[in-house]
Amino acid sequence: MADRETRPPTVWSRPGRGARGPAPERSRPQITAAALALADEEGLAAVSMRALAQRLGTGPASLYRYVGSRGELLDLMADAVAGELDLSTPSGDWLDDLVGLALQSKAAHVRHPWLADLNDRRGEVLGPHAIDYLDHALGILAPAPGTAGQKLEAIGLLGGLATLFARREALAEGPGDPPARAVRLAAVAAEGRHPHLLAALAEAGGPPPADRDALFVRLVRRVLPAMLAP
């Protein structure tokens, strides 16, 4: 109880704007949407209260009536992305449903590459959409085997895999895409100094599949049942 009382308040625990000042010109959702657009276009480092104020055609001081700090703005941004996920009623097949949720999470990371930089913060501050996501994922896992701790670990692993594969997709968009890298790697292995790598490449059957989701889905389907095994 003492820890809960001393924990600093979050941006969601306060009114949508300060009581003082002129009539409201903005709202937190509008400010958050502008910050998301700025981060998507220029990266997370470009998001500052001053840059955001310029984008909105106002002064930085006016934004502080809605958001107390850049840290709170980042919390709002992370939670807004969590709100993009479809948390429809599960079908009852927990593995299929969780794979679908994982694919949505990966797609969100692809749309917002800066999101990976906020992963550490999201573990400390959970907004309402993030809590909805966590509760929804636990609801999907209700019929699955495993303890509550195992299920929370599995959900955390899904987030890490989504981040990892989204980063791989971002790297694959430029020169040196996965098939090209695989060819170069095979050429190095074929020189004879790396027989184990050469054998693995030969057995794997060439470069990765064109469907970027295929490996992700296959990995999730293999890892989750193993993590939740009694």
Image: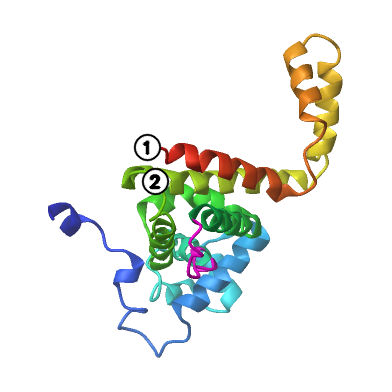
Residue 186 in the magenta stretch? The answer is no
Span of residues in magenta: 82-93
Three-letter amino acid code of the residue under disc 1: Pro
Residue 71 in the image: state x and y as whole percent.
42, 58
Whether residue 45 can be seen here: no
Q: Which of 164 and 227 lies nearest the eye of the viewer?
A: 227
Majority SS type along the magenta span? loop
Q: Which type of secondary structure does the marked residue at label 2 adopt?
A: loop
Residue at image mark 2: 145
Q: Residue furthest top?
A: 193
The residue lying at 48 percent from left, 76 percent from top is: 29
Which mark, residue 4? none
Whether residue 206 can be seen here: yes
Q: In this view, does 116 lie to the left or right of 193?
A: left
Q: Which type of secondary structure does the marked residue at label 1 adopt?
A: loop
Residue 119 in the image: state x and y as whole percent.
48, 49
Q: In which quarter of the image is residue 175?
A: top right
Residue 70 in the image: state x and y as whole percent.
44, 61
Residue 89 in the magenta stretch? The answer is yes
**Image quarter of the C terminus:** top left
The vertical placement of 85 against 117, above or below, is: below
Q: Quadrant of residue 201?
A: top right
Q: Residue furthest left?
A: 2
Dot 1, crowdedness within 10 Å: few (<14), some or many (≥20)? few
**Residue contact at pointers 2 and 1, CB within 8 angstroms:** yes
The mark nearer the N terminus, 2 or 1, is 2
Three-letter amino acid code of the residue under disc 2: Pro
**Image quarter of the N terminus:** bottom left
Dot 2, crowdedness within 10 Å: few (<14), some or many (≥20)? some
Residue at image mark 1: 230
The residue lying at 32 percent from left, 47 percent from top is: 148
